Amino acid sequence: MATKYPPAPNIGSQIERALICYFKVCYGDDAAKYGFYFSNDWQKRQAPCVDFLAHKSTETIAHTRNESYMVRLEWKWKGNDVMGENEGAVADWSEINDFVGVGMAAMSVSDTGDPNRIPVIVAADITAAAVAAAQADPDNYKDLESFVCEFVEYKGAQRAESADGTFFIKEIRHFEIRAGNTN
């Protein structure tokens, strides 16, 4: 028996995966050096990587399934001194800052230099990356073909949080992202 209703899109999952598509474009050839993971990704995280988590939402217009999510982006890399692995190693802070900086630049794009345009331009670029992924790989991204990111706003940072005391060091950025679907 077929379901009575088609499934409603999982906006949080769509945001996470759309951001991954966008970041892969923004990091260009360097994207191959990094792992990009959405919250429900079963793969073991390998540093350096970026984790995407859309974790709390409100519906922006009642009964529309357009949602405004709090989104946490975590850039992770191996710590300086992991016992038995890289003892005595020193982190290349320039490389780490560039790793985080490219993502932050991608989330801060404006076509005019006007900071008021950032939420609109970045949202349009995220939408374009998601739709392109849906067209290129419909088996994995079909649900993104009608995805629309409407707004992106930076909400602050946490710095250098240690994940397990030794293995990962993190830079964390928080955003509010509004999205929905055209259908």
Image (tube, grey):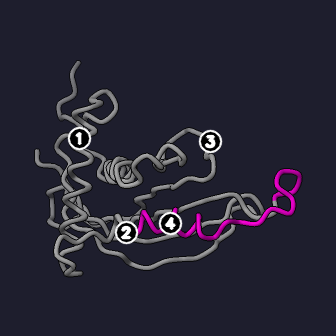
Q: Residues within 10 Å of mark 3 (few under 14, many from 20)?
A: few
Q: Amino acid at mark 2?
A: Ala
Circle 3 sits in a helix, a strand or a loop, which is it? loop
Residue 105's tag is: 2
The answer to which of marks 3 and 4 sits earlier in the sequence is: 3
Of labels 3 and 2, the one closer to you: 2
Rounded to the nearest angstrom, the CA distance separating label 3 from label 4 is: 21 Å
Instruction: Decide which of 56, 116 is in the foreground and name it.
Output: 116
Query: How far across and how far down the image is residue 106, in percent?
Result: 35, 64
Q: Image point 44% across, 79% down: which residue?
A: 156
Task: Name the residue beneath numbered marker 1.
Answer: 132
Q: Residues within 10 Å of mark 1 (few under 14, many from 20)?
A: some
Rounded to the nearest angstrom, the CA distance separating label 2 from label 4 is: 9 Å
What span is colored magenta in the figure? 82-104
Q: Amino acid at mark 1?
A: Ala
Q: Is residue 86 above or below residue 104?
A: above
Figure quadrant of the C terminus:
top left
Rounded to the nearest angstrom, the CA distance separating label 4 from label 1 is: 24 Å
Q: Amino acid at mark 3?
A: Lys
The answer to which of marks 3 and 2 sits earlier in the sequence is: 3
The answer to which of marks 4 and 1 sits earlier in the sequence is: 4
Residue 44's tag is: 3
Q: Residues within 10 Å of mark 2 (few under 14, many from 20)?
A: few
